[in-house]
Amino acid sequence: MATWIERTPGGQGLRVAVKDLLDVAGLPTTAGSRVVAESAAPSATDASCLAGLRAAEAEQAAALVGKTNLHELALGVTGINPWFGTPVNPLDPRRVPGGSSSGSAVAVATGEADVAIGTDTGGSVRIPAACCGVVGMKTTWGRVSNRGVWPLAPSLDTVGPLARDVAGVAAGMALLEPGFDAAGAACPQVVGRLRLPAAGEVDAAVDGALAAAEVDVEDVELPGWAAAGKAALLRLATEAWECDHRWWATGRLGADVARRLQEGSGTTAQQQEVIAAVAAAWTGELARMWKRVEVVALPTLLALPPLIEEAEVMMSIRATVPVNLAGLPALALPVPCRPLPASLQLVAPAGNEERLLALGARIEAAVA
């Protein structure tokens, strides 16, 4: 039951799971936290982004099947939850499921849902997708409404779908944004390859998938990558403290979440100015790159998902956070590797989710 915090009766059509960070009318929002759950009342209304799901339910084309578990307060990348249990990674139960949208990834990976809705502030859709061998989409910041979604870091928070394949993610996008259609999107032909210090088998898997898809690959360099990641993490911690410090004050959060929240408590005005300057420089660097390539490819994780007892390495192997600082869309999809699938991450300019899905579908078919 660790995959789920609340099951619902469901119905006909596409089975949709929702991370328990989104308000669902009639159900409490726990944010995966014991202390939050104890005082949480049933939500009066749905999160705005669920309007498409409700419309599909009315036509018996989709059905909400429950609210999924997550890393407490969405502030973590392992998916380990001491209060509601840790969702079991279906690829290898000894390994972390990834976070924070752990239950969402496991629900689709195990076939308990066709589509799951998660959130991504620093990688929280893409990381569990990578750990569990499914597809996950981080949407462009601001494209999908966050109203009614528990805030972690509002300037970085996004909502996005997970599914077992690219077509399922496209169906999830159509629920989040009625009218969304990637069917006619042009498939990018020029892909930039960003090389990070990844494990050899992961790099080989990424390169092999791009070769199989027969796209033109051009190596790119992004000197601002590391600085953007550092700035994004500080911004995330700072905003998380502003949003959730009242729960830290109870002394009843999990130790890892309490520690990470406190890291954001002392950010100075000067540090905030540095973050803004780094973000501006990073956006400019990416804008120059988009003149050369249409999409950038890199691993989602720099190594295969670790064993649960080695979960702390997740912080150092994720390759996701700088994307959030720029507010760009990104797609994570599994590609062949041993002993587990690796995850290829595709990043595009803002508003180009359709382009990512077109290329993702091409790669998926090429490696099948």
Image: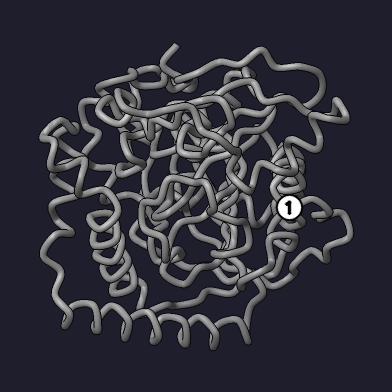
**Looking at the image, which is closer to me, 81 or 12?**
12
Instruction: Inspect this view and state whether residue 18 appears.
Output: yes
Q: Is residue 267 above or below residue 263?
A: below
The structure residue drawn at horizontal position 63% and vertical position 69%, both measured from the top left corner, is: 295
The structure residue drawn at horizontal position 63% and vertical position 78%, both measured from the top left corner, is: 293
The structure residue drawn at horizontal position 33% and vertical position 39%, both measured from the top left corner, is: 73
**Looking at the image, which is closer to me, 209 or 167?**
167
Classify residue 294 by image quadrant: bottom right
Classify residue 39 by image quadrant: top left
Q: Secondary structure at mark 1?
A: loop
Residue 38 locus on image (x, y percent):
30, 23
Classify residue 231 by image quadrant: bottom left
Q: Which residue is mark 1?
A: 177
Q: Is residue 309 above or below residue 241?
A: above
Residue type, label 1: Glu
Q: Is residue 304 above or below residue 183?
A: above
**Looking at the image, which is closer to me, 42 or 335?**
42
